[in-house]
Amino acid sequence: MKQIGYLLLIAVVLFSCQKEKKEAKIIVPEVIEEEKAPPVITEFGYILNDFNVVKDTIRPGDSFGAIMDTHGISRTKVFEITNTIKDTFNVARIQAGKPYMLLKTKDTTEKAQVFVYQNNKIDYTVIDFRDSIIAKKSKKPVTLVEKTASGVINSSLMQTFDDMDLNFLVAYNMADIYAWTIDFTRLQAGDRFKVIYTEKFIDDTIPAGVDQIKASYFEHRSKPIYAFRFIDDSINNSIDYYDEEANNLRRAFLTAPVKFSRISSRYNLKRRIKYYGNKVRPHRGTDFAAPIGTPILATADGVITKSERRGGNGKYVKIRHNATYDTQYLHMSRQAVKVGEFVKQGDVIGYIGMTGNTGGPHVCYRFWKNGKEVDPFKQDLPASKPLADSLKQGFYNHVQPLKTELDSISFKPQKPLEIL
């Protein structure tokens, strides 16, 4: 019996051990992941991780003092800042719509220490008032990328660029280059262009505008016109555009005082108007129709001799260019110049309006030669100075590879119209 009891005791112990093994939990050691440090963010020369960053936009009515006051900077400190940096940055000229950034301490005081004002996508001004007060103007790093474009015009240059998703700033620059040789109000379907240009990028991804047009080709009324950018005065860094034979594309006068407008009425001494019983009412100007507020440009260098409002002319400006030529610009909504001012070709002298005798928004452009009003489109207007002979060989060497590249660009047709 003792033997049987002993065997039963062993069986009970073995059963209990197996039960404990089954009920035992498997303990997996906990893996503690190390926290990754946040990426270091730098902008405008500062490590933003070290600050509480406030980004905002200047609102209408905002002032530098008001912004500083909102962020805890006293009027005494604001006066000290503005007085110290006045030769570098005039805080009174901050503009609504411009972005700015404030860097503040990462503690309970959140004390403002740095103000960054972005003049545009590239230029910015830093005011650092942590210890001593320092102001400096800087630029973001810019990458230049060469691009090409081409197209065939169906209606207008701007519409073609829009339809083909091309940068409209290239169209504006091309209009400036050919302003003396092509009347962009009279482009024809089938006119076509090619262009080589450089575009600016910030951080290699953010577009920041067109840098320059290096070369272009414009075929207007089946007449090809090349344009090549060339420095013709290295001392003054003077730049102009020349055709493949080194002829300057610039003329003494622009073909129009308004960009991308249309001619609604031409110079016509025998014009008959139905409203006046079909009587002859000479029109001694050329009307360029455009929306109210469109800038009006001086077609040549000169001195302002009139800037006033008078009768049917409405608000107008008159420019004396030299002993031979004068121009006049009527029906402005407002003038942008005063008598006695010197203006350069392309300067804004006023804005399209409807003052005086006019049935719609336009500028009546009048042109005098030797004191007599004439049709500017029938004048043999003088060209600008030619390229110096000493520079021509260098010009030809510069132009050859650009012309080869232009000629190799195929014309990209317009996108086909969608049928709804």
Image (cartoon, rainbow, N blue to C red):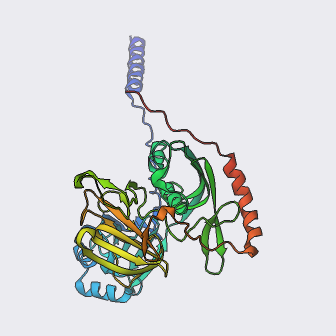
Image quadrant in which you'd find residue 261: bottom left
Q: Is residue 348 left or right of residue 57?
A: right
Q: Is residue 317 left or right of residue 199?
A: left
**Nearer to us in this view, 80 or 48:** 80
Figure quadrant of the C terminus: top left
Image quadrant in which you'd find residue 396: bottom right
Residue 243 spot, x, y in % from top left: 66, 61
Residue 391 spot, x, y in % from top left: 73, 73
- The residue located at (60%, 47%) in the rendering is 222
Q: Exactly how many numbered labels are in the figure?
A: 0
**Nearer to us in this view, 3 or 60:** 60
Figure quadrant of the N terminus: top left
- Give the vertical position of 320 relative to 160 (above or below): below
Q: Is residue 366 visible?
A: yes
**Nearer to us in this view, 185 or 1:** 185
- The residue located at (40%, 60%) in the rendering is 267
- Give the vertical position of 71 relative to 261 (above or below): below
Q: Is residue 206 visible?
A: no
Residue 245 spot, x, y in % from top left: 71, 62
- The residue located at (71%, 61%) in the rendering is 399
- Give the vertical position of 93 relative to 163 (above or below): below
Residue 321 spot, x, y in % from top left: 47, 78
- The residue located at (44%, 46%) in the rendering is 159
Q: Is residue 55 left or right of residue 120?
A: left
